[in-house]
Image: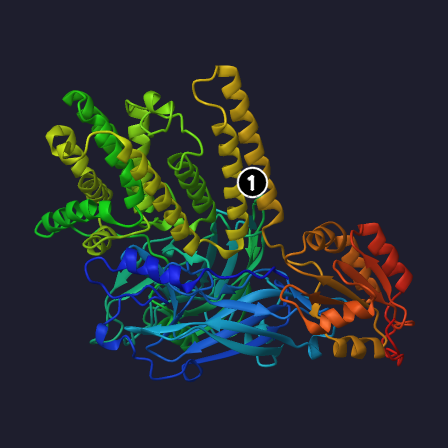
Amino acid sequence: MLAPHRSIGSFALVLIALACGTAGGQNLDILSGRKLDPSRINAQSAGPESIVAVKAQILPATANRSAMLAVTASIAPPWYTYSTTQKPIAATPTVIKVDSSPDYRLAGEFRPNLPPTIEHQDGLVFEEFAPEVTWQAPLEVRPGAVLGTLKVLGNARIQVCKKGACLQPTDFAFTALVATDETRTAEASAPSGVFANPNVHATIRGQLEPQAVAPGSTVNLVISAETSNNYHVYALGERDTGALGYKPTLIVPTNTSGFQTQPTKASQAVVEAPPAVPGGEPQRYHSGRVTWTTPIVIPKDTKPGQYTVAGLVGYQTCKDDVGCDLPTGTRFEGTISVEPTPAKGGAPLAFASAKYIEAAKAAEARPRQSQAVAPTAEPVNLSTLPVIILFSLLGGFILNFMPCVLPVIGLKILSFAEQAGHSRAQILALNIWYCLGSMAVFLVLATLATAVNLGLGEQNLGWGEQFKYTSFNVIMVAIVFVMSLSFLGVWEIPIPGFVGTGPATDIAAREGATGAFFKGVLTTVLATPCSGPLLGPVFGFTLHQPPPVTFLIFGCIGLGMSSPYLLIGAFPRLIRFLPKPGAWMDTFKQMMGFMMLGTIVFIFNFMNRDYLVPTFAMMVALWAGCWWIGRTPLFENFGRKMAAWTQGAVFAALATWFAFTWLVPHESVIPWKDFSQSQLAKLTSEGNTVMIDFTADWCATCKANSFFAIETEDVRQVMEQNKVVPLLADYTDGSPEIKAMLETLKSASIPLLAIYPADKPSQPIVLRDVVTKQMVLDALKQAGPSKIGGSKPLASMP
């Protein structure tokens, strides 16, 4: 059970979307972040229920995977929906929730059967599915539960969009039963790794290599065909073209658990031959044994576990001047084992018979990005390149005025004021250092954008995509927050070039190269969530360009962004319009401090919701640490300053560790059900031992009890052994029914744990206030196991 979180107000989302996405007169759909045709903004003629159909089923375990819960969404064209990993800054992600139950629990996260179609627009990334997608999660059936009668209840929150319109996210409830028509499950045999159709002169073999793979690595889907008696098998094709005379080999993954695949490579060259029939296409085939290898990329953030890979192979074998076997096919299924420590060897695939037409239909229907293709360089268009360079320079210049960047630009305005009266050479040098910091970031971004081409990674990282990593967002919040505290006078950053207050002003009167470089880095990093006008076609152009051109384009964007500072460095008279240094700088500096706090609100808008509370707690810890450091003036002796720094840093570090250890939601190890008096009466009358935890999100002692005493593996095991039914009485928002129950138990406050024995439900065991794990275990032992089938009613409550 995850603790509930309040979503950030829609006002902030609207404000950010208007600020970052409407430059140049663009219209945005606030829900999805997509540009809209103004004439179609209200084009919502149909309800979601008429566009989306959601169904769910339980797939029984096979020889090479556990039982799975499959949730399928079918979307009517031209509509599409978004992935569960979609970043909220761009669109509304799909959320699938399953009701808790003592009979089952999800043993992993939901993953789609295929990777989403990736769309890029104005620096945002959209992960789309259409017309159908199936999310699967491993399902652990509790001891004593009967799979055949199991029901899994839940709901999927889905938003659908089409060009020019998006509907409001809608909850679709589902009930999953055990699948009875799952052909693949029924036909799949033990994973022998070999398939042979007696009517075809070829043997198919397959496995996943290596046997176990670590997150951040690549596993290979290896499928080979070995022909006999001088027969040959045809070369791999994208789809069945309908050509006369032969059928291409088709390898179609239908389920990769959402992992991206890279282009398939053959182990031997293709043999070219004349058409088999007059008017047909030339034949392309392999003789002997050929192996096709499809790399599957496992992201670094993948959790350890078992992940399914399945698909279809369609193939045909022929012999010169003799004839051909009929086209045929096979299904395959295997398991990718993601473990911290990789293991060599291979995991064989399980094969089952299929028809060629099945593979052909699957190949025709698969999304255009079902296989991730490394960007291929196109010839550079010399007539287009100058226009792209001009757009890059102008787009980089406009980035200085994006809301994400504006607060940090205040740093440079203050620096300009300070530089007035300094030597021209010094002013030019400082501005060059600032631009070098900015260009360094663009160099890194260009490297990430061409990582695949340069052989430095398995996927390219687009503009602003670093903000999809929660750890990066948390670090940026920390940096921006401590800077804003410095601007507001809480403490002084001891880096030359960061304007201080009081005695520190003299120390920071001259900006150093380090401070100038760091400002350039920070300004550019904060610019990446926003993509100004003109940059959309620029980034699209770089997708299929060789690395030198990509580096040139990113360099031009950086040069455009740096151009105002280079001009001011070369012509210092341009800053004479600024007032002379004085009291106005302190007011302006504090205004910039509040604007930087606004930047944090912007980052909070798209940060992982589970980390909002711990990140806010980290900010409070940093505030306290900076305040403690700020109490010691910079002119004090070195010993006192180091003591203050050490104490403040240690406190902030410990408090941050506490926040990200305790305040991040944890999945419950106990399958809680919602409390109600009618539910309690029903359970006890059926002979169940029932445990009720009265808790609330605002109750710190309740949280401590849950973490240390209740939500533990020892307690869970005892409850499973005794078949104790857990009920959660959530008092966060108040409840007359829970309050009345507390009064019945002679308690006016929480926390409270009540255990109703199966044989004495009218005499509950009550644990109040702070409890220990041993107290809970002793109480469960005292209550005893459930007596299912009993008829003891809940007579009266004490």
Regarding residue 144, the answer to whether it shows in the image is no
Badge 1, how many Cα within 10 Å: few under 14, some, many 20+? Answer: many
Residue 113 rendering spot, x and y as whole percentages: 48, 66
Q: Nearer the viewer, residue 757 or 252?
A: 757
Residue 623 rendering spot, x and y as whole percentages: 50, 38
> Residue lying farthest left?
383
Which residue appears at 67% of the width and 65% of the height? 731
Compared across the picture, whether 284 is left or right of 673 comes to left
Q: Helix, strand, or loop for circle 1?
A: helix
* The quadrant where residue 245 appears: bottom left
- In this rendering, the answer to whether 372 lies above or below 557 is below
* The quadrant where residue 425 appears: top left
Compared across the picture, whether 724 is left or right of 521 comes to right
Looking at the rendered structure, the kind of residue marked 1 is Thr
- In this rendering, the answer to whether 554 lies above or below 629 is below
* The quadrant where residue 307 appears: bottom right
Residue 530 rendering spot, x and y as whole percentages: 29, 52
